[in-house]
Image (cartoon, grey):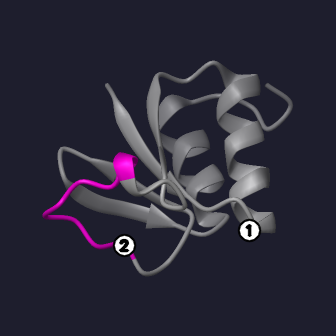
Amino acid sequence: MSYRLFTRNDCQACSEVKSFFENSKIEHELVDLDNENDIPEALHVKIVPALFKENKLIAYGTDIIAYILSVQNISRSA
């Protein structure tokens, strides 16, 4: 199960979600919207952080953490 996480550098919620993914060791692709080379041409994300799976938005904001906790069956301390 692979996720794509869209973030920006100046976003506190993005930092929180990125840290959660790193600490949980969940497989994901990080897309930095501040780096134009990372942005897929057909995808325009206006809210960050945004979590996609198979090009479908599944969660955004810090709700991403709750979503991952529910589908991965892991604890918040992971």
Q: Earlier in the sequence, mark 1 or mark 2?
A: 1
The structure residue drawn at horizontal position 49% and vertical position 53%, both measured from the top left corner, is 35
Q: Quadrant of the N terminus?
A: top left
> Where is mark 1, residue-wise?
11
Query: Which quadrant holds residue 7?
Result: bottom right
- The number of numbered discs placed on residues in the rendered structure image is 2
The structure residue drawn at horizontal position 79% and vertical position 25%, both measured from the top left corner, is 78
- Which residues are the magenta region? 37-45
| Residue 71 percent location from the top left of the image | 46, 39
Q: Is residue 18 magenta?
A: no
Q: Which mark is residue 45?
A: 2
In-image side of 18 versus 52 (left or right):
right
Q: Is residue 22 above or below residue 68?
A: above
In-image side of 65 versus 46 (left or right):
right
Q: Is residue 74 above or below residue 4?
A: above
Q: Nearer the viewer, residue 57 or 9?
A: 9
Q: What residue type is disc 2 on? A: Val
Identify the main secondary structure in magenta.
loop
Secondary structure, mark 1, is: loop
The structure residue drawn at horizontal position 13% and vertical position 64%, both measured from the top left corner, is 42
Q: Is residue 44 magenta?
A: yes
Query: Which quadrant holds residue 70?
Result: top right
Q: What residue type is disc 1 on? A: Cys
| Residue 2 percent location from the top left of the image | 33, 28
| Residue 63 percent location from the top left of the image | 61, 65
The structure residue drawn at horizontal position 57% and vertical position 56%, both measured from the top left corner, is 64
